[in-house]
Amino acid sequence: MTYRFSLRRSLLRAVLALGTLSLLAACGKDKPEFMGSDITGTRLGQQMSLVDTAGQPRTLADYQGKVMVVFFGFTQCPDVCPTALAEMAQVMQQLGDDADRVQVALVTVDPERDTPQVLREYVTAFDPRFEGLTGTPEQVKQAAQSFKVYYAKSPRPDGDYSMDHTAAIYLLDAKGESRVLVNNTAGVDVLVHDVRTLLELG
């Protein structure tokens, strides 16, 4: 009797253990694997309120339904910004038809010089589907803080100025939730992989 009870208990433990392993395996499959840093749950960008290149007010809610790629920079940036936008243009090409479900947006950190018209001419030179976002200095500050982005004027000897800024790339899912933070040096393949992963999530 004791032996049967012990055997039954052992079998029950084995079944429970297998069930737990199966559950964990299932959970693991549901969790997306990004090449960039997973920032799911941070809700970055939710306080963004800017204007687009047509002068229309924009928040993240306006882009729901699309995976959004957000980069902070400015049109007179000598290297990092044009390089990032050129890579994003390559990403859009590699995505093919899926690119229609992606919105790339450059948020300026230099609203004094980057008017909607200036931004439109700049971003569409890389890809006509790209969007530029600007606003008042206070709106830009709020957007940057919402994404935890640093930026500051950097005076030059000639009396003009440049801009120091965070150069990371933010990926948001179709629901407008921040999901991935990609280093600006990560490259096209990483961006394509993570954007595709978000597109598959829907």
Image (cartoon, helix red, strand yellow):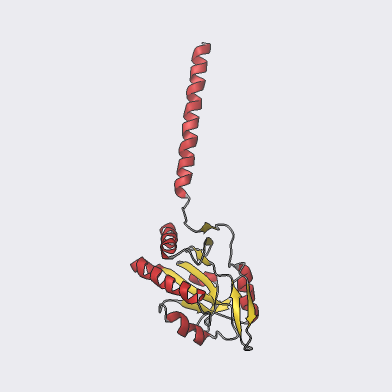
- Measured from the top left, where is residue 13 in percent x and y? 51, 26
- Measured from the top left, where is residue 191 in percent x and y? 44, 63
Q: Is residue 90 above or below residue 156?
A: above
- Measured from the top left, where is residue 96 in percent x and y? 34, 68
**Residue sitting farthest toward the top:** 1
63 or 99: which is nearer to us? 99
**Residue sitting farthest toward the bottom:** 158
**Residue sitting farthest toward the front:** 157
Viewport quadrant of the C terminus? bottom left
- Measured from the top left, where is residue 139 in percent x and y? 62, 77
Q: Is residue 129 visible?
A: yes
Q: Is residue 172 above or below residue 77?
A: above
**Residue sitting farthest toward the left:** 96
Image mark count: 0
Residue 150 quadrant: bottom right
From the viewer's perspective, tell me whether residue 138 is left or right of residue 119: right
129 or 78: which is nearer to us? 78
Q: Is residue 100 visible?
A: no
Q: Is residue 173 above or below residue 110?
A: above
Q: Kindly identify the residue that appears in the image at 46 percent across and 85 percent down.
A: 121
Q: Kindly identify the residue that appears in the image at 50 percent across and 83 percent down.
A: 119
From the viewer's perspective, tell me whether residue 60 is left or right of residue 200: right
198 or 3: which is nearer to us? 198
